[in-house]
Structure formats: structure tokens, C-alpha cells
Image (cartoon, rainbow, N blue to C red):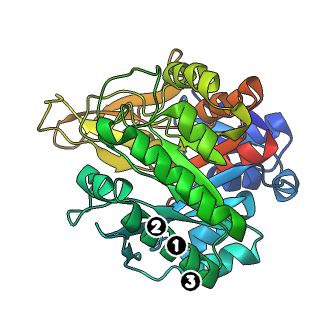
Amino acid sequence: MEIYVVESGDTVDRIAAAYSVSADSIIWNNQLVAPFALAVGQALLIGTLEEAAGLQPRNAGGYAYTYISPWVLEQTLPFLNRLFVFSYGFTVDGGIIEPPRDDAWMIELSLEYGTVPVLTLTPFGQDGKFNNNLIHQVVTNEAAADRLLNGLAALMQEKGYGGIDIDFEYILSGDRDAFTAFVRRAAQIMHPLGFSVSVALAPKTSADQKGLLYEGKDYAALGDAADEVLLMTYEWGYKNGPPMAVAPLNMVRRVLDYAVTEIEPSKINIGIANYGYDWSLPFVRGETAARTIGNIEAVQIAIRYGVAIEFDELAQSPYFSYVDEEGTDHVVWFEDVRSLEQKYALLPEYGLKGIGVWQIMRWYRAMWLLFADR
């Protein structure tokens, strides 16, 4: 499959004729919306419907909440090796908090497609945010940790899970070693039962990187303790931050350059962002909050306002600006098949295991076709 960037005057029919493919294949691959208008600078994935039908999944995982659309999940599962169900929580004494909506249907559907369902464990407080005090209470209490991990192991056997993913964020620096010990204990309990153990890691660029996101994560020790890791290589551009690329390639490379010095590359999965942000301008820190949008939605916004999509060469990411009906300026950063192709090419370059997509709640067909084709 090839990538084509739309130029002024292009139509779906003209592009189809130039590549000797059907217009329907371009519409289907790229989820174009009638009347199938295009934006200058829009990246299209070009290939026949027969090519798309023959593609097989690569080493890819995707995160999903239990309220995902069944249709979206069914579309995505053929491209996944692992489905990370988000998420299970816990109490300070090691009790298990199950998701608010039943996950049995996701596990059953996942297994039907030959995809391994993975239980994702997160330390959410009552406010729904990561709670480092909750982490501290459990990882420093051997009895609570064992109660939690043994309880999870039994639940995973009962429900049909194939592994556990430990996604703890904002770990206190003083709990760094205790957290590593918790992951090692998880492996001791899970491995005899045939379960894998993975860990999500904040995107560090050095061992001594400062900040609450980074200081509690020992890359080398966690990489040794877990079967695999996910580098959360996204959120440089984030909801409450200034407008910029969500996952700039230059920053992703910096993370990988460090990570492979601490962790066996064949254990590393890179995080892929399946979303973008729409910022209203001017940006005022503490006041401005970007709107989360899907990658398909981003292109539709550009088409609606008749603006061209630009491409930042350093970040290898698409973006555009527009003015809405109220006269408010906006800037949008998102992902397209060009930016995703550049990130996927890092796998063979660094000898990595695969990818983990955050998250799969929005269906983006071109991304999955691209990954399966490359």
C-alpha cells in the first residue's frame, strides 16, 4: 500500500485513476465521508480492497475501556495480538476494584479472534485520577500486595485473561524500588499460571530525569522484571498544555535512544497515539483545555473550514489552523498515515517487539491497514 498527499484540484476519482485502483477502495481505506471532499495536504492510504482483505496482524496491542462500541472492537480485533482491558483498580489493603461495566464480553470476543486479553491494573483514586498514595500503601505493604496479586491471578484464571499490564503513574521517587519489587512479585505469582506481565513506562530520556512521572520508574530493573514494557511515547502535546504534536518523532527517538540502553529492545513496545487535540487560541496556561478528537475527525474539520493540512518535518506530524464561526482561532495536531509510518519504521530500526495503541475507542482503519502492511 502507498501513501498519497492530496494536492489542489484532486478528487477521489482522479487519484483512483492515477493509481489504477477503485474509488471505493480509497473511500473505504480512509473512511471518507460523502460527498468525499478532500483537504489539501490530507494523507491517503492507497491500495485495493483485495490487498486490504489479505493483511495479517503484526505484533500490536490496543487499550480499550469496557464501554467500547462492540462494532469498533470487532473491526479492530483482527489487527491485534493483545487487547488491554482498561482497567482494574484496587484498595489500600489489596482489594480488587472491577471496571464499572462488565468485561466478560470483551474477553469472549477477544478469544474468538485469537487475541490475548490482558487485564490492565491502574491505581485510580475516588476522583478517577492516578493516586500515588494508593500506590505507596500497596507496594510498601507485602501483605496487601500479595492479597492483590493473588486475587488478580485467581480472577484472571476465572475470566480467561492471558496476562496483566501494570500501569502505575506518578509513583513517588521514594517508592521506586518498592514498585520494582511489586512487579517482580507479580511475575513470581503470574508466571507459574502461564500469565505474562507487562509494565507501562513514562517516556524517560535519561536515568536521572526529574519529575513525578519519571523518578519512580527504574527502566533497567523494570525491564528485567517484566516480560515486556510499553513506552508511553505520546502526550507531549496534551489537553492542558500548549499546542504541539502529541507524539513528535524527534522526542520518540530520544526516548528510544535511552530505553534501549537499559531494556532489551525485544521487550519494548512503543506507544502509538490514536487521537489528536484541537486547541482554542490564544493558549492560556491554567485556563485553556484542548478538545480531544479522532484522527478522522481532524481531517473532517480541515475539510469543513476549507484549510490545508500542513506537515511539521521535525515532529513528522500533521497540523492545521482554522477560524470557527465565532471568530475564534484554533490549531489542531493529530496523527495520519505519514506520521504513523515514521513511528512504525522505528520497530525494525531499533529491533523492538511491537506497538501499543492508546487507545482503540475510535476506529481508524487506515492506521491498522498501514501497520499490517508494513
Q: Amino acid at mark 1?
A: Asn
Q: Position of residue 264 (x, y in %)?
A: 69, 32
Q: Position of residue 134 (x, y in %)?
A: 27, 58
The residue where tag 2 is placed is 146
Task: Say what secondary structure mark 2 lies in.
Answer: helix
- Which quadrant of the figure contains the N terminus? top right
The answer to whether residue 203 is left or right of residue 191 is left
Task: Say what secondary structure mark 3 lies in.
Answer: helix
Residue at 54% over, 45% down: 37
The residue where tag 3 is placed is 104
Q: Is residue 104 visible?
A: yes
- Is residue 24 positioned above or below 342 on the image? below
The residue where tag 1 is placed is 150
Q: Is residue 36 visible?
A: no
Q: Label 1: how many residues lie within 10 Å, few (<14), some (14-19) or many (20+)?
A: some
Give the quarter of the image for residue 31: bottom right
- Which quadrant of the figure contains the C terminus? top right
Separation of residues labelled 2 and 3 (CA atoms): 25 Å
Q: Are marks 2 and 1 in contact (CB under 8 Å)?
A: yes
Give the quarter of the image for residue 331: top left
Of 38 and 373, the residue lying toward us: 373
Q: Are marks 1 and 3 in contact (CB under 8 Å)?
A: no
Separation of residues labelled 2 and 1 (CA atoms): 6 Å
- Is residue 199 positioned above or below 187 on the image? above
Give the quarter of the image for residue 365: bottom right
Task: Say what secondary structure mark 1 lies in.
Answer: helix
1 or 3: tag closer to the N-terminus: 3
Q: Position of residue 93 (x, y in %)?
A: 31, 70
- Is residue 348 positioned above or below 335 on the image? above
The answer to whether residue 163 is left or right of residue 295 is right
Q: Label 2: how many residues lie within 10 Å, few (<14), some (14-19) or many (20+)?
A: some
